[in-house]
Amino acid sequence: MARLTWKADKVLELCGKAEAGEAATGWDGEVLPPSLSFVKDDGVYLMPHRVYGEGESPMSTGEVIYARGYNPAAASYTWDKGQEACGGDDFSEQIPTSEIRELMGRVPADVTITSFTIELTATQMSFSLRGKGPRQRK
């Protein structure tokens, strides 16, 4: 099983950009709800699935966040590492921002969510969160 992790505040920032942008379509031409694209190609990353203006791209607008350890610009990343985690084929899977917000909304208000994780198996994709709660007093 592969565990791909991002900083939660950065994921929420991308959700806001996807929700504020013009809705994009899927491969079949159907307009999709606001979503993030979970992508594996040169690295493993999230980006808003939205319409970009002429001359704009997710990279040029700074709207790509790589999973921890999966940024191709890092010396520790290799193409094989991405292939081992996500399989050999490149892909883009849409994750509705409503699902991410619903998951994060279940966390008690006194817990600070620090990371968002996608766990992959051969047949499933699931999400989990990590956070820090209030310090317990003796």
Image: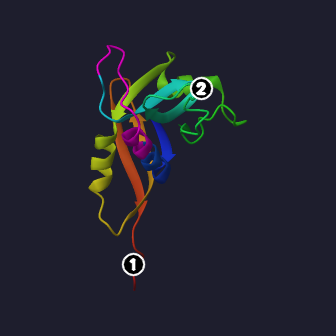
In depth, the one of 23 and 4 nearer the eye is: 23
Q: Is residue 60 a member of the stretch shown in magenta?
A: no
Q: Is residue 111 above or below residue 21?
A: below
Which of disc 1 and disc 2 is earlier in sequence? 2
Q: Look at label 2 and name its amino acid.
A: Gly
Which scheme is used to colour this image of the protein? rainbow
Residue 55 position within the rendered picture, expressed as x and y whole percent measured from the top left = 59, 26
Image: magenta residue range? 15-30
- The circle drawn on residue 125 is none
Query: Label 1 neighbourhood size at 10 Å, few (<14), some (14-19), many (20+)?
Result: few
The quarter of the picture where residue 20 lies is top left
Residue holding disc 1 = 136
Residue drawn at 66 percent across, 32 percent down:
77
Q: Is residue 134 above or below residue 114?
A: below
- The circle drawn on residue 55 is 2
Residue drawn at 32 percent across, 13 percent down:
28
